[in-house]
Amino acid sequence: MKKKDQSPTFLQKLQAKWKLKSLKQVLLVLLVFALTGFTILFIKKPIFDLLGVSMNRGGFWKTVLYFLLVLPLYQLVLLFWGFVLGQFEFFWEKEKQFFRRIFGRKNKE
């Protein structure tokens, strides 16, 4: 039995916020985020090992390297998984918004 004034679910709220066409697309976008996170988790250590950076301790240079190498790599992996799961257009638009915010450019729309 359904309530008449049923509030939207979490996934429906994401669908509206991200302007997606279906709940299936919301799930695919969430899957892209999950796969990207796991991919970065597995390739971060070999990258740091290659550069001779210990993963055991934090530190200023480790943080700098993380921002210079891992975060841009995250953006590329996000686009890769978006492409593989048919959500490239969504993530490409998000990437353009991200770079506009960083470089202070206004949206052309």
Image (cartoon, rainbow, N blue to C red):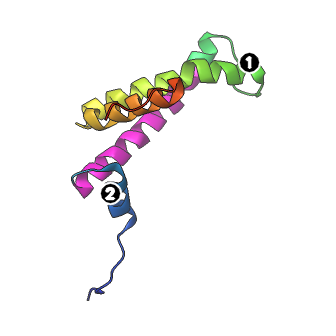
Quick check: 61 above or below 19?
A: above
39 within the magenta span: yes
Image coordinates for residue 68, horizontal then vertical, percent? 59, 18
* Quadrant (top left/top right/bottom left/bottom right) for the C terminus: top left
Q: Classify residue 51 as left or right of residue 13.
A: right
Q: Which residues are magenta?
A: 22-46
Q: In this orientation, does residue 54 appear?
A: no
**Quadrant in the rendering for residue 52:** top right
Looking at the rendered image, the disc whose residue lies closer to the viewer, 2 or 1, is: 2
Residues packed near mark 1 inside 10 Å, few (<14), some (14 to 19) or many (20 plus) = few
Q: Nearer the viewer, residue 81 or 47?
A: 81
Which callout, 2 or 1, points at the residue further toward the start of the chain? 2
Q: Is residue 36 visible?
A: yes
Q: Residue at x 56, y 18 (%)?
A: 69
Q: Secondary structure at mark 1?
A: helix
Q: Position of residue 81 (x, y in %)?
A: 33, 32
Q: Amino acid at mark 1?
A: Trp
Q: Nearer the viewer, residue 35 or 101?
A: 101
Q: In x, y percent, where is residue 12? A: 32, 62
Horizontal side, residue 100 vs residue 53: left or right: left
Up-down relation of residue 56 to residue 11 (above or below) = above
> What residue did someone put label 2 on?
16
Total numbered circles = 2
Quadrant housing residue 67: top right
Which mark is drawn over residue 15?
Answer: none
> Is most of the magenta stretch helix, strand or loop?
helix
- Identify the residue at image location x=51%, y=23%: 103
The residues tagged by marks 2 and 1 sit, at their Cα atoms, a distance apart of 40 Å
Query: Circle 1 is placed at which residue position?
Result: 61
Q: Label 2 is placed on what type of residue?
A: Ala
Residue 81 painted magenta? no
Quarter of the view holding residue 87:
top left
